[in-house]
């Protein structure tokens, strides 16, 4: 019982230490990413170079690990590991928490062409976290900016990149170049979702005709390739041609037209992300 109590107490002490450390680090990260004025104040007080290129790296964990009972402990251990690697790469690096993820701010870079080195840094952190901490993190290397004072302008795109990496089949480390198209597409979907206006004909079709809705979804997933769509759905090509033509007549949209195709794709993506039991009511 004493040994068990000691083990429990030590775990609580470590968790408390990590939480205190994380809160202190979080304050530093948030200040730098709040805006130019806060970044300048932080740079001055901590003697960090403010006029040289800088970059932000965000490191996330899978939902299953982020919601585990020992998540707080793992976050602290990950931050400590990232601190060791970041300090070896750049002694002035700042590591902490940002919106539940581990953030690494790397100031004082030699040039704006430092992306390969930053990627190697992130890969080292991810690799060692899996090896020594037993977790499976993934990382987003944000764009390199000319100076620390403008680093806050990259926060949104780095967060979007991290979400892309976290939902990709091959989690790992990525830069904006790896997911640039996906980031812009998700941004378009998000803006579309926030609007209340919808194409009435297409919305009605997706709501009322499950067969056509599923065919359109498969058709766009197959990059408008009828043969591929037919293969995925186990249908004859002529059946797919008929259904696509029927959907086009019902909605007035020409799916071969880039503009109409984009309108349809946004509606279909929203429909596909809606739970099955709600699709008929949306």
Image (spheres, grey):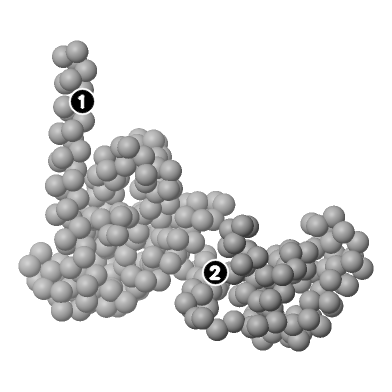
Residue beneath the point at 39% across and 35% down: 134
Which residue has dot 1 on it? 8
Percent position of residue 136, x then y: 43, 43
Name which residue lies at 26% across and 39% down: 73
First reached walking from the N terminus: tag 1 or tag 2? 1
Name the residue at the front extreme.
281
Q: Residues within 10 Å of mark 1 (few under 14, many from 20)?
A: few
Residue 244, above or below 75: below
Q: State whether residue 176 is above or below residue 26.
A: below
Percent x, y for residue 257? Answer: 73, 85
Is residue 230 in view?
Answer: yes
Looking at the image, residue 112 lies above or below residue 1: below
Q: Is residue 215 left or right of residue 110?
A: right
Q: Position of residue 57 (x, y in %)?
A: 34, 61
Residue 68 vertical placement versus 174 (above, below): above
**Residue 92 visible, this orientation:** no
Provide the secondary structure element on which disc 2 rests. helix
The residue at 15%/79% (across/down) is: 37
Q: Residue at x 48, y 58 (%)?
A: 165
Along the line of sight, the residue nearer the viewer: 113 or 213: 213
Which of 173 and 10 lies nearest the eye of the viewer? Answer: 10
- Label for residue 30? none
Q: Identify the image quadrant of residue 106.
A: bottom left
Q: Which marked residue is nearer to the observer: mark 1 or mark 2? A: 1
What residue is pinned by disc 2? 182
């Amino acid at each position: 019982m004493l040994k068990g109590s000691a083990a429990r107490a030590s775990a609580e002490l470590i968790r408390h230490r990590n939480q205190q450390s994380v809160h202190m680090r979080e304050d530093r990260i948030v200040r730098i990413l709040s805006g130019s004025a806060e970044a300048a104040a932080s740079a001055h007080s901590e003697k960090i170079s403010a006029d040289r290129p800088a970059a932000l790296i965000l490191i996330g964990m899978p939902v299953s690990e982020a919601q585990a009972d020992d998540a707080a402990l793992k976050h602290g251990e990950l931050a400590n590991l990232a601190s060791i690697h970041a300090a070896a790469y750049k002694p002035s690096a700042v590591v902490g928490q940002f919106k539940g993820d581990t953030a690494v701010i790397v100031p004082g870079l030699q040039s704006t062409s430092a992306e390969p080195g930053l990627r190697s840094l992130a890969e080292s952190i991810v690799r060692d976290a899996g090896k020594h901490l037993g977790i499976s993190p993934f990382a987003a290397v944000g764009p390199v900016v000319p100076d620390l004072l403008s680093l806050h302008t990259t926060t949104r795109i780095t967060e979007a990149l991290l979400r892309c990496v976290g939902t990709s089949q091959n989690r790992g480390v990525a830069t904006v170049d790896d997911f640039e198209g996906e980031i812009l597409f998700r941004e378009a979907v998000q803006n579309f979702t926030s609007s209340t206006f919808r194409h009435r004909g297409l919305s009605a079709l997706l709501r009322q005709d499950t067969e056509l809705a599923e065919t359109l979804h498969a058709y766009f997933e197959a990059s408008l390739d009828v043969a591929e769509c037919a293969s995925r759905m186990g249908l004859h090509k002529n059946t797919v041609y008929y259904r696509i033509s029927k959907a086009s007549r019902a909605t007035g949209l020409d799916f071969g037209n880039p503009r109409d195709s984009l309108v349809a794709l946004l509606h279909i993506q929203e429909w596909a992300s809606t739970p099955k039991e709600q699709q008929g009511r949306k």
